[in-house]
Amino acid sequence: MKVPLIATINHRTIDLRDKALKVKIYRNGKTEAVKSPYTPYYYIENKEGSEYRTIASDKTVKLSKREYLPMRDTVPPQALYDGGREALLERLLIEHPDFFKDYPNTDNLKSLVFDIETHSPDGSFPFGEKYPVVAIGIVTSTGEREVLLWDGEDDRKVILKFAEYINDYDPDIIIGYNLVGYDIPQILHRARFHGLKGYKKILNRDNSEWGWEAPRDQKDLKMNAGGRIILDLLRWTRLDYSLSGIPRGLKSVSQSFGLNPLELDFGSKDLLDYSMEEINDYVLSDVDCTMYLYNHYFPQIQYIAETLCVPLATYVNAPTSYITKILQGRSLFKQRIVTLDKNKERHPEIYRADKGNYQAAHIELYQAGYHERNIKVDFGSFYPSVAMALNLGPDTSRIVGYEDYSDILEEKDDILYIPDNKVGKRVMLKVDHSQKSCLYKMCADFMEMRKPYKEGSTKEDKSKSNALKIMVNTFYGANANPYISYGDMGVGLTITAVARWLLLSGVSIIRGRYGKDAVVYVHTDGINTNCDVDVDWLVKRLRILMKHTFSNCEPEHITMDKDYYKEGVWLQIGNYVLRNEDGSLTKHGSTFKATTRSKFYLKVLDKIIDARINNTINADFIEKLYDLQEYKLTDFVMRKNQGRKKEDYKSETDLILRLIEQGESIGMVTSEGTTFFYVRTKDGYKLESMVKDLDEIDIFYYWDTISVLLQKFSLSEWIKKKPPLTLIDKKQQSLMEWM
C-alpha cells in the first residue's frame, strides 16, 4: 500500500517544547510521530496584508496571516479562519497534498471479519446490556475461521475470548456489516454489564479508550480503534450504484453477488431454539459473505486512498463529501481563494434548517401498471456532466441576486436565472468562463482516469472503474452541504435545477416523437419508456437546446446510455419490478422489502410478480393464490418497532400501545427499540406468542392483502370477493351476508 494505514493530528499531538505540531502515523504495525509541515493559522484583515479572493465571489480582501499553536497561543477575537479551528488534518491534506507519499505502508495488511448473534429472552430487538452475545463468528485474511460460542450460562467468556483473539491476531483492519451500528456497541454493552475492566479498549491496538458508545440509529458513525481501522461494509454497499433497488441487508446484498447465505427463521423461533451447530453454521455463513464483500470493495477503497494520497483510514472514515472538500480545497488554496464562512452563512436565503435547502431531483410516475417492454435511458454521470457543461464551481460561480419566482430557466445578459420553488425565488448566478472551474477539472481528471478501466475486462479494471465512478458522483455533495466551507450552495442548487430541466426536456422530446404514452417513469437522471428511443437523436436534441439556452456552455458533456428490460410493473413512485434481459428481476422500493412485512405478503408478492412477468395469470393460479391453507402460522407474522416511551402513545387505538399492553400482560419487558412480532386474528392484532393455531387468523385481512397486491399489478379483474367457506368458521360466516 502506497499510503499509511492511519494518520492523526490534533491538539494532543502538539510538542510545546518544540513549538511544533506532530503527525501521529500508523504504518507497518508501528507508530511514529513526525513534525507537521502545516501549522494552524488565522487571518487578520488589514491594509498591509496580501490580497486574496473569497469563495463564490469576485470580492478581494487584504489579509495578514498569523500562525499559532492551539492550547498554547491566544487568538484575538477579530481573527478570521480559513477552514476552521479544528480541521488540522484536513488543512494538512489541502496545503501539502504530497505529504503522505513519503510514508507508505506494507502491503501485508492483516484483516479480520466478525459478526455476532445475540439472544433476546423477551422477543424484543436484542440491543442493550440485558441481551447476551451467543456467538461471534471470525474469519481472517490469513484463512482462519472460528466461532466463539457461549456455554449456555454466561457470555462473559465469549467476549473475553474475542478480546484475546483480537490481541493475538493483531489485525490492521476490523471488518463487519453494520458493526458500527450494532455489533461493536452491543459487545461494549455486554462487556460493561459484566464489569470487564477496560472494556472500551477491547478492540484497540494501543492503550487508548473509546469515549463513546454508538447508538443504533447512528448508522454512518465511523471510527478508528487505537491504531486499527474499523471498516463497516454497510456504508460501501450504500454507495454502490450497481445495487440500486436492492435492500441493503447482508442477506440481500450477498444474494445479489451470487452468494447463498444461510437463513434462520427468527419470526417464530428464538435464537436458542436452534442447536449450537446450526448457530455455528449460520454465523460462519454471515462472516464468509462479509469477507467476500470486503475482498470486493477493499481494492476500490485502497485505490482511491492511494490516488488521492490520503491515509487509508481518512478515506474509510470520511463522509462522501469530505474528499470533494479536500480536492476543491487544494484548488482554492492554489488560487489564493479563502473560505472564511460556511455554506449556510454564505447563503441565508437558501439555507433553511427547518425546511431543507433547495429543490431536489425530479421524480414522477406517468403510467402505473404493467408494461410489456421497458427501455431506460440514463444520463451519464449526470450532475458532474452538468457542472462541466456550464463550468460551475465555487471558484467560477457566484450568486449576484434573487428575483420573484417563475418556473422559467433562462440566461439573460450573461446571468443564469435559476428557478427554485423551495427557495421561492429565481436565483441569479454569474459564471466566469475565463478559466475552467476546479469542479470541472476534478470531474474531467477522474473521468479520464476511468476510461481505460471502464473499457477493460479484468476484475481489477472493473474495481477501479467502479471506484472512480463513485468518486465522480460524490463531487456534487460538498457544494450541496450547508456546513461545508470549501463548496458553494449556489453551485449545488444550479446543478440540480439544470438537471431537472434537462430531464423534463427529455421527457417532452420523447413524448413529442413517440407519443404521450411513451414515458413511464422518471427519476433524477433516467427516463423509463415503453419504446425503443433513439438515444443519439435524443442527445443531439438536448445539446441543441442547451446551446440555444446558454451562450457559454459545452453541451458535448451531456451523454446518455440505454438499458433494455423485457417487462416491468410500476406500482407507485419508487416502487417497481423489471425483468432483465437475462431473466433475472430487479426490484426497487419499500413494497419489496421485508422490514415489517409478513412472509405471507412477500410470498404472495413474488408469486404475482412471477405470474405477471411470465404471463401465467389464470383461474387456477388465482385459486391457489387465495388458498391460505398452504401457509404456516409463522408466515402471517408481522413486525413493528416501539419508537418511543409507552406514555408518549396517546391514542388507545394505537397498535404499538396495544402490543405493549399485551406484552406486559405476559411479563414482557418493553422499552424504546423493542420489536413486536404480531398477527392479525379474528379478535384483532395479537402478539405472535399469544396465537396458537392457524384457525385464529383473520381470513378477510389477509385476503385483502392479496387483493391490494393484485390491484397494484393492474389485475383487479382477478380479485376474489368471498373466501371459501372451508376457511371461515361460524363467527366469520355471519360477515358474509353483507359481502
Image (cartoon, rainbow, N blue to C red):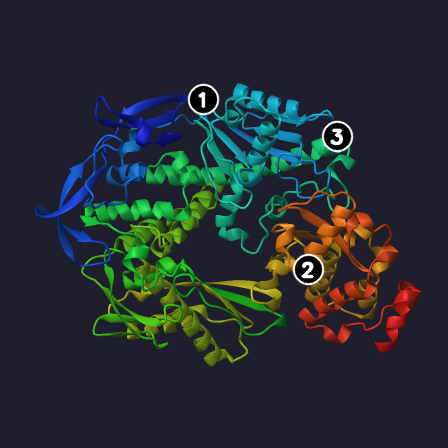
**Foreground pick, 128 / 469:** 128
Counting from the top left corner in percent of width and height, residue 478 is at: 35, 52
Q: Which mark is residue 276?
A: 3
- Secondary structure at badge 3 equals helix
Counting from the top left corner in percent of width and height, residue 441 is at: 28, 52
Q: Are marks 2 and 3 in contact (CB under 8 Å)?
A: no
Q: Is residue 382 left or right of residue 114?
A: left
What's the CA distance linking mark 1 and mark 2? 49 Å
Q: Which residue is mark 1?
A: 207
The part of the image, by quadrant, that contains residue 100 is: top left
Amino acid type of the residue tagged 1 in the rendering = Asn
Is residue 3 something one can see in this rendering? Answer: no
Which is more N-terminal, label 3 or label 2? 3
Amino acid type of the residue tagged 3 in the rendering = Met
Instruction: Answer above or below: position of 398 versus 7.
Output: below
Amino acid type of the residue tagged 2 in the rendering = Asp
Which is more N-terminal, label 2 or label 1? 1
Q: Which residue is mark 2?
A: 654
